[in-house]
Amino acid sequence: AQSVTQLGSHVSVSEGALVLLRCNYSSSVPPYLFWYVQYPNQGLQLLLKYTSAATLVKGINGFEAEFKKSETSFHLTKPSAHMSDAAEYFCAILHGGSQGNLIFGKGTKLSVKP
Amino acid sequence: DVKVTQSSRYLVKRTGEKVFLECVQDMDHENMFWYRQDPGLGLRLIYFSYDVKMKEKGDIPEGYSVSREKKERFSLILESASTNQTSMYLCASSLWGVQGGYTFGSGTRLTVV
């Protein structure tokens, strides 16, 4: 069975600092992995996805994530945080054997200090 | 711009009421999903549908039912609302295989009093 674990329910960084949000996965088949962002009182928006092409995936708003099979990780990074990045971030994995179910992590809330 | 539209952003209902949450997508997506989101618990799948008139239970279907009479519309029904169903409800849709990811609606924050 597939699963994802997000390490840290809250992360706080200063404006301009590196953002690193951690996601580890468990999968018996090559995984499809996703990162979503949720701004307050809104739905989730797709940031980026890994579908077995390039291991370094670039997304919107300057975010990127690197698929590392040896570490079973798909961490989300951004070189320089902006105040507007404050939101909740969710890692997700495609449920193997389904035609479309995603399994979500519990989320990491990112705070950005001025 | 592709859209998933949820009929209400905020809803307040009384215990025991039958509640309908509506979701419409304009992208001709085969798959549609209902999640509830609670602090510390992330997103939990209630029901999903891969086709018209088709429905499958997710992880927490108890107290809920769904209807998909048309491809673009997926309704979530709370048969008899209870206070523990107070939550944020999120609808999403995707193409078959979901490699493109889900598109989410803006959510309905339901309060049951």
Image (cartoon, rainbow, N blue to C red):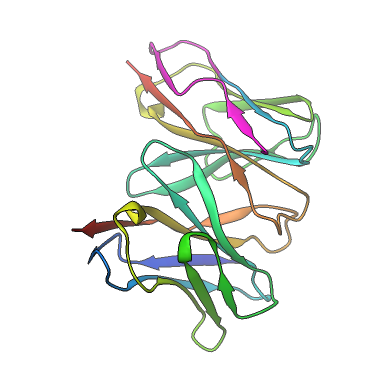
Q: Is residue A54 visible?
A: yes
Looking at the image, residue A110 lies above or below residue B26? below
Tell which of B38 and A111 is nearer to you: A111
Image x and y of residue B111, in percent: 36, 21
Question: Picture quarter containing residue A52?
Answer: bottom right
Furthest residue to the left? A114
Give the side of residue B66 with respect to residue A46, left or right.
right
Question: Picture quarter containing residue A79?
Answer: bottom left
Q: Is residue B35 magenta?
A: no
Magenta stretch, residue numbers = B1-20
Furthest residue to the bottom? A70
Looking at the image, residue A32 lies above or below residue B112? below
Give the side of residue A1 with respect to residue A112, left or right.
right
- Tell me the quarter of the image containing the C terminus of chain B: top left
Q: Is residue B4 magenta?
A: yes
- What residue appears at the point 60 percent right and 22 percent down from the top-left corner? B22
Image x and y of residue A95, in percent: 64, 60
Give the side of residue A2 with respect to residue B74, left or right.
left
Tell which of A73 and A50 is nearer to you: A50
Image x and y of residue A55, in percent: 61, 80
Image x and y of residue A24, in percent: 46, 73
Number of numbered tags placed on the structure image: 0
- What residue appears at the point 57 percent right and 62 percent down from the top-left corner? A48
- What residue appears at the point 49 percent right and 16 percent down from the top-left corner? B80
Q: Is residue A106 visible?
A: no
